[in-house]
Amino acid sequence: MYPKVDLHSHTLASDGALTPAELVARAAEMGVEMLAITDHDTCAGLAEGRRVAETLGIELINGIELSTTWNGAGVHIVGLGVDPASAAMVEAQTHQHEARRLRAIEIGRRLDKLGMPGALEGARDLAGDAEIGRPHFARFLLAQGHVRTMDEAFRSYLGAGKPGDVKCHWPSMPQVVDWITASGGIAVVAHPGKYKMTWSKLRRLLKDFIAAGGQGLEVSYSGENPDRVRELIRLANDNGLLASVGSDFHSPAFHWAELGKYPPLRGEIQPVWERF
Ligand code: AMP
Ligand code: MN
Ligand code: MN
Ligand code: MN
């Protein structure tokens, strides 16, 4: 039996619904022993999370989920055990903040052209101090009645291949792996099943990822099916990659992703959490 770990979660610092303090408290309630906060492109929630983690006796891993592109595809790389104050992590966050700012302007421009004005301002208001992202645009479209659900906002306007899917500002995958490694962290390919890649394309991604210094693969996460989890474990083992797991929790309202929950691990793995 493995300890109850969750190495992928979001707070209000990016597109999550809970404060870092609320997130850590919920993780403790769920019996999570080791938690990584991995907000999109920011470490802003870590300090608050750590204060609460210490009082509740839960081990907090400093994390981040960095947006990248690889061969034209948007790919997320999780960094675990990073030092948020390191030069590399400061550079990464500065770069990504500017990328999100410019991307939001472009998304707003495109939605405006499609007859949905005011999206940039609306999304900025909803984001507040958080790193602005597509979920903030989705919530704006929902509030304005342009769509009936968040899912429809992504299917029609913001998801892969749609007008609001603007990837040109993201750094390359090797650049992001470099930032993570230079800040003392372990780079992990996030939710590999979500990219709709063929297995051979995923193998090519892993080859480039490993060449860049990447060491881990998320093998189990919310929404993945048990057969694919088995295949991902095999893929990790074949490539000498450490296995990571996480719920990718965003909100108590998203019933399909709860802290500490993901499909069970079967068979031998090399757990990334043993490195912490
Ligand atoms: P961004 O980081 O700004 O590119 O936004 C990507 C985020 O949008 C993901 O991390 C998810 O949290 C969210 N997301 C993606 N697809 C959907 C969907 N169909 N419904 C709701 N949220 C989604
Ligand atoms: Mn998200
Ligand atoms: Mn992601
Ligand atoms: Mn995530």
Image (cartoon, rainbow, N blue to C red):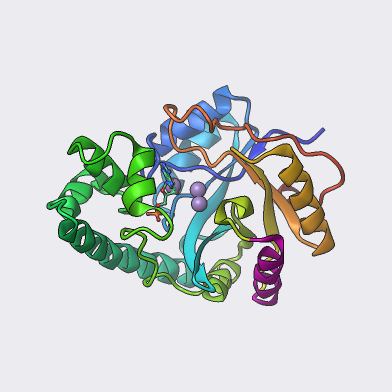
Q: Residue furthest right?
A: 268
**Nearest the eye: 200 or 7:** 200
Q: Is residue 14 visible?
A: no
Q: Residue furthest top?
A: 29
**Nearest the eye: 9 or 70:** 70
User: How many marks can you see?
Assistant: 0
Instruction: State the residue at coordinates (38%, 72%).
Output: 168
Residue 26 in the image: above or below residue 161? above
Examine the structure image and report whether residue 242 is included in the region drawn in magenta: no
Whole-percent x, y for residue 69 in the image: 49, 69
**Nearest the eye: 62 or 250:** 250
Q: Quadrant of residue 226?
A: top right
Instruction: State the residue at coordinates (73%, 44%).
Output: 229
Q: Is residue 119 visible?
A: yes
Dominant secondary structure, magenta: helix
Residue 127 in the image: above or below residue 41? above
Residue 68 lies left or right of residue 215; in this view the side is left
Whole-percent x, y for residue 124 in the image: 21, 51
Whole-percent x, y for residue 176 in the image: 52, 70
For the magenta stretch, what is the residue range? 198-212
Instruction: State the residue at coordinates (36%, 68%).
Output: 94
Examine the structure image and report whether residue 202 is included in the region drawn in magenta: yes
Residue 207 in the image: above or below residue 162? below
* Placement of the N terminus among the 4 image quadrants: top right
Instruction: State the residue at coordinates (50%, 55%).
Output: 64
Whole-percent x, y for residue 63 in the image: 53, 52
Residue 43 lies left or right of residue 6; in this view the side is left
